[in-house]
Image: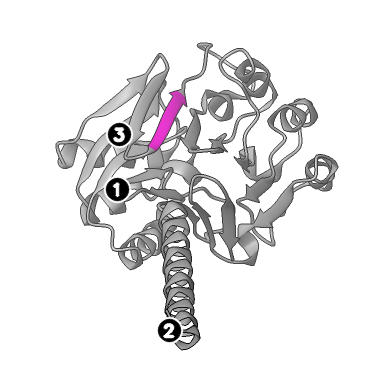
Amino acid sequence: MSLKSLITTGLICSCLLLFSCSYQGTETDRGSSTDAADNFSVSIPKIGKADAIVLKTENHTAIIDCGERDDGAEIIEHLKKSETEKIDYMFITHFDKDHVGGAPDIFSSFPVGEIITPDYEGNVDEYDTYISAIKTKNLTATALTKDLTITLDDVTLTVYPPLKNSYAEGDNDFSLVISATHGDNSFLFAGDAEKDRLAELSSQFDLEHTFLKMPHHGNYNKGTNAFVQSVKPKYTVITCSDKNPPKDETLSVLKGVGSEIYETRNGDITVVSNGKTIKILQ
């Protein structure tokens, strides 16, 4: 073979090798993008000192609490923007007006699958309206007395009911507490749990979680410090308002464990998980 032929052959092989390497690199990038698909979101609208938390997986929607009576329309609009057609699970953590008030409006706007509540009766007008709406819509609610695990696509929810029949703090300590796991990320939604309820949680499950919805709108009690130290959240959301901001003591404890703190008084919050990392938009 002549020198000219050798040079030509070498150039062709080099080009083929470069094309092959470039093609393999592109496939790797595409694979990484697929692995990091954002397929679990937690959205928390700005509705003041009240809770309404929307969980969305690829095929399912769940809602934790429904805000106050006047928040119903805003929560419905929030759900419509995220193209919600049906609520598969509604969790009412407890029957205070700022957690159950908007439920009747939501019943009128979306099909609701299962309703999960703690096992006690509320004592506010909003509770009575909620019970009436359930009867009118021919819905049923399960009053939880033992742990419940639910799978929504690749997200596992475990719901923990209160362990006692009575608490000094009443409604707040009857709060259902919900833990969600999505890959390496874990999410803890603690309702309005006060010190007695917070103290018993460590006997129910491992408290350490990546994300925390701070209980009771950022109020501080004798159990707050130990609770936060156990959870060690990397990210914390507090549902609050300018009129009812979180307590300085609570913020100090959260900062002490290095948690990034987000407050709904500053706007709607969306938390997105790809199973490995979390990003928060506000």
Q: Nearer the viewer, mark 2 or mark 1?
A: 2
Q: Is residue 14 left or right of residue 142?
A: right
* Kind of residue indicated by mark 1: Pro
Answer left or right for 199 relative to 183. Answer: right
Q: Which residues are magenta?
A: 155-159
- Residue 49 screen position, x and y as percent: 59, 52
Task: Kindly identify which residue carries mark 2.
Answer: 5
Of residues 130 and 266, the one nearer the viewer is 266
Q: Position of residue 170 (x, y in %)?
A: 57, 24
Q: Which residue is mark 1?
A: 104
Q: Are marks 2 and 1 in contact (CB under 8 Å)?
A: no
Which quadrant is home to the N terminus? bottom left
Instruction: Indicate the position of residue 229 as horizontal and vertical percent values.
Output: 77, 30
For the residues labelled 3 and 2, say whether their Cβ atoms are less than 8 Å apart. no
Mark carried by residue 155: none
Residue type, mark 3 in image = Ile
Q: Residue at image x 47%, y 57%?
A: 32
The answer to whether any part of residue 119 appears in the image is no
Q: Quadrant of residue 210?
A: top right
User: What residue is disc 3 on?
Assistant: 115
Q: Secondary structure at mark 2?
A: helix
Q: Nearer the viewer, mark 1 or mark 3?
A: 3
Q: Determine if residue 64 is in view.
A: yes
x 78%, y 43%: residue: 254
The residue located at (32%, 42%) in the rendering is: 129
- Helix, strand or loop at disc 3? strand
- Is 156 a magenta residue? yes
